Image (spheres, grey):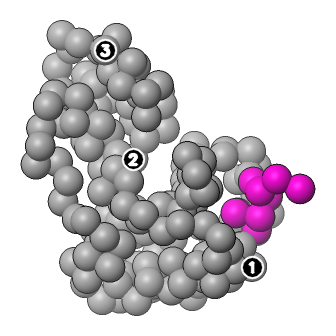
Amino acid sequence: MAHWFRFMESLLGRSYDEQMQILREEQGFTRAQANALIMYSKGSTSSQRVETPADYIEALLEPQRSTAQSILDVISSAFPHLELVIAWNQPMFRKDKRYYFGISTATNHILVAPFDAAVLDRLAPQLTGLTRNKKTVQVPNDWAVDEQLLVAMVALQLPS
């Protein structure tokens, strides 16, 4: 986070919209991530919307709620040594200070993020039918959760 706080200092004096554009288009942030960083950098104390992953899931509507919960359950089960936390107002899996996987939600889809674009390059053949962004993959709200794909997204980042 220290890197991003320093990065935000370089954007001082720019409008919210300019900062949002830079974070989303040049840095690969989701809208929610960019907003959280901008608001935190401006001193907002109300930018934290949820305190726990359960709070995040509870706020979703079906079928998105069930799909998001299933995604988190797959990662939790396969990698019990990773900690599920809220970061940037979204559920994220980490070990120590390194993040390995996260999700965020929009009205019409869920974004899954393995935190390493090279992972998405390696898994490109398995992403057929899904929308790949720079560092995330959009899955439908009613996605038939692909457990193998999710596990591979994390496993490819773990030390050998």
Q: Which residue is drawn at 42% across and 64% down?
A: 85
Q: What element carries label 3?
A: helix
Q: Which residue is drawn at 43% across and 34% down?
A: 1
Q: In which quarter of the image is residue 77?
A: bottom right
Q: Which amino acid does label 1 sit on?
A: Gln
Q: Which residue is drawn at 32% across and 64% down?
A: 106
Q: Give the range drawn in magenta.
A: 152-160
Q: Mark 3 points at which residue?
A: 9
Q: Name the residue under label 2.
A: 30
Q: In the rendering, at what x and y percent does residue 2 appear? A: 43, 27
Q: What residue type is labelled 3?
A: Glu
Residue 111 makes an appearance in the image: no
Q: Distance from label 1 to label 3 (Cα)?
A: 40 Å
Mark 1 or mark 3, earlier in chain? 3
Whether pointer 2 and pointer 1 mark residues with C-beta atoms closer than 8 Å, the reply is: no
Q: How crowded is mark 3: few (under 14 residues within 10 Å), some or many (20 or more)?
A: few
Q: In this view, does 140 lie above or below 30?
A: below
